[in-house]
Amino acid sequence: MRSLPERPVVGVLHPGAMGAAIGSALKAAASAVIWADKGRSHATAKRAELADLIAVPDVPELTRRADVVVSICPPHAALDVAREVAAAAAGDPPLYVEANAVAPQTVQAVAELFGPENVVDGAVIGPPGWTRGTTTLWLAGRCAPGVAELFAGSPFEARVLGAELGAASALKACYALQSKAIPAAWLALFATARVYGVEEALRSELDRKGSEREMTTMARRAVDRAWRWAGEMDEAAAAFAAAGLPNGFSTAAAEVYRRIAAADADELGSVWGMEG
């Protein structure tokens, strides 16, 4: 098992809402938590500043300085980020924590870039962890115990699934089927009911069963995250297909989210029943 320095330098790619929380959680165990500034938005820079992360110019510089790199980005970008780090590492890779919502097969592709001994498979379940008791980080791989130790005492509860890469991502894919495919199904059924002019009657029936308010809230939250969840559902579909099980649930959810992400304000209102 690869050993880490007592207080490693950790690079976070990239400090979105979850990445900033992860970076903040790692500060107590790391000598420095760094992020790559090049090409990132003002909002990203502000999150990194509030989390007290240290900016470096770009991904190659981050790769050279970091002992550990945590990739936490939109799922559709996961492989591109891994390839960029692998290219910058030039045969001397940092320990790479693939913490995105991707299929086990994607984790294996990452392992081919870095070598399986240099990769930890991670899956975050819960919101950005700023307080304890809300968020779990599941880890798998030979070096998973060492990464879990970095989160000791932090808001993220790190749990090790074992040494097999892909286990954490498989768990995330299964969890995502209920947390993200179900809201997509509600969005689709409301949109269909709207086409046939029976939405009010449908909502009345759902309200009678006590589920209309909860499902409307869930669907509204999904609309805000559609641009990201489409890729996650693609990855979940790949995981289910590789297991020899139907993957149409996730594939359909991905298509719903892609349509919503591409919709203009008029379509969001007329088709999906949501304000832009």
Image (tube, helix red, strand yellow):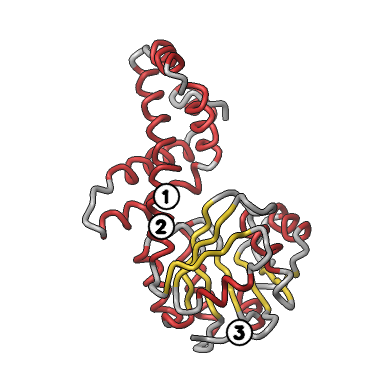
Percent x, y of residue 117: 45, 83
Residue type, label 1: Tyr
Query: Would you name the residue on which mark 1 appears?
Result: 175
Comes first in the chain, label 1 or label 3: 3
Q: Of helix, strand and loop, which one carries label 2?
A: helix
Q: Is residue 163 left or right of residue 224?
A: left
Look at the picture and state if 215 lies above or below 127.
above
- The amino acid on which the numbered mark 2 sits, given as a three-letter code, is Leu
Number of numbered discs on residues: 3
Residue 234 vs residue 156, the one in the foreground: 156
Using residue 155 as the reference point, say whether residue 75 is left or right of it. left
Structural crowding at the residue carrying mark 1, measured as other residues with C-alpha within 10 Å and reported as few (<14), some (14–19) or many (≥20): some
How far, Cα to Cα, is label 1 from label 2? 6 Å
Secondary element type, mark 3: loop
Tell me which residue sits at (51%, 33%) in the image. 218
* Residue assigned mark 2: 171
Local SS, label 1: helix
- Give the distance between the C-alpha atoms of the residues marked 1 and 3, in whole angstroms: 31 Å
The residue at which mark 3 appears reads as: 4
Q: Is residue 58 above or below residue 137?
A: below
Tell me: 178 left or right of 81.
left
Q: Is residue 122 left or right of residue 153?
A: left
Q: Position of residue 227 (x, y in %)?
A: 50, 45
